[in-house]
Amino acid sequence: MSAGTAVRGAALGAVAVALGVLYYAVDPARSAWMPRCPLKWMTGLECPGCGSQRAVHALLHGDIAAAWHANALLVALLPAIAAGIWLELRRESHPRLYARVHSPLAIIAAGAVIAVWGVARNL
Amino acid sequence: MTRIIIMTGADRRRAEEISHLFEGGNRVEVLGILAEGSVIPEGTEWVVYDNAADTEMPEGVRAVRLAPDRTPPESAADILAAIRGAEAEADPDTAWARTLGVNRAERPVPPPVPRGESAVSGAGLKQGEGGRTQCGTPGQIQGQTPGQIPGGTPAGEPAGIPAVPGSREEPMPPTYLVWSVVMTVLCCMPAGVVAIVFSSLVSSRYYTGDTEGSRRASRMAEIWIIISFVAGVITGTLYLPMLLAGVI
């Protein structure tokens, strides 16, 4: 691993840890500091990511039920995201597996799941 | 050998003179002299009109009209020049091949290039890309041989990093799909959606063999993920101050 990659990894890790601490300590539902989704604020509609802050807060406190209630898609996607990051880190050594998993169909399916969720949660 | 038909009107004499001009030559074979309106026989490449009305050409047959003022044409070279001129206009490749003495029809067609492979130096491209990827680095790739891949390569998964440039399939550029999805759900939906669209372009272009387009889409996906992150940070930081200032 070169210095550049290490620095990048360390920076990403630091940001992730800082956000983790922040969202553990602060309850987005009660704090005025936490931004509300502009879409929800303006239209009242929930976007696919609405509730993610509350969901992360709940997850960090081990409350999966509350997280599911806040944003079910985020909770449902967690295993897939974890697997995706695992594969992302092995892109160089497993290029064929990477290319197969990242087929056009898979990416369109991922986009479709998010879109359907965004529509369905507002019905 | 260009096979021609001379199509003539009522006066056959001039057509016969033209035909004689080619006798003994090795560049033009006169298949025959036909009256105007006749059916063009198979194997004809060119129809030379001599004072005849235009006839509908079968597919693959081309036509050239001789200047009516020359009676009779001075030489076969004149007619040949007319044919070659029309030929160059219609099909420059074949004309060039003839000029260079190459038989274009018999030239072997190279086998189709397998998808994903590229004649461009694989190592060089990946070196340029390595600086931008999450987990790859220029130094790491350059000095690598298949045996030295960190973490090894499982038996079922052939190593895809080319030891010799172009010797293997070019790996897919990073699609950043995971980060696009994370950004869409966690951070800033509009920019995240744009990133997902570019992720899908990376993949679809890669599978259609457009590796350069795929790399461009990969770069755009990365840029939009950064835009999404920055937008999220700005929104998060300025939310309360703007709220207090009454802006929103």
Image (tube, coloured by chain):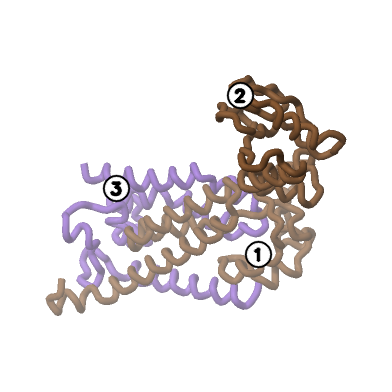
Chain colours: A purple, B brown
Residue type of the residue flagged with mark 2:
Glu
Circle 3 Cα neighbour tier, 10 Å, few/some/many (<14 / 14–19 / ≥20): some
Is the C-beta separation of discs 1 and 2 under 8 Å? no
Q: How far across and down, in percent of the image, does residue B107 sit?
A: 78, 42
Residue type of the residue flagged with mark 3:
Gly
| Chain identifier of the residue bearing label 1 in the image | B
Disc 1 and disc 2 on one polypeptide chain: yes
State which mark lies toward you, 1 or 2.
Answer: 2
Residue depicted at x 77% and y 59%: B146
Residue type of the residue flagged with mark 1:
Lys
Residue farthest top in this picture: B39
Residue at the disc numbered 1: B126
Q: Which structural element holds mark 3? A: helix
Give the quadrant of the C terminus of chain B: bottom left
Left or right, residue B231 beside residue B23 = left
Residue farthest right in this picture: B24
Which quarter of the figure has residue A93?
bottom right
Distance of mark 1 from mark 2, alpha carbons?
64 Å
Circle 2 Cα neighbour tier, 10 Å, few/some/many (<14 / 14–19 / ≥20): some
Is the C-beta separation of discs 3 and 2 under 8 Å? no
Which quarter of the figure has residue B124?
bottom right
- Could you tell which of marks 1 and 2 lies nearer the N-terminus? 2
Residue depicted at x 39% and y 60%: B183
Residue at the disc numbered 2: B36
Residue at the disc numbered 3: A118
Front residue of B55 and A44: B55
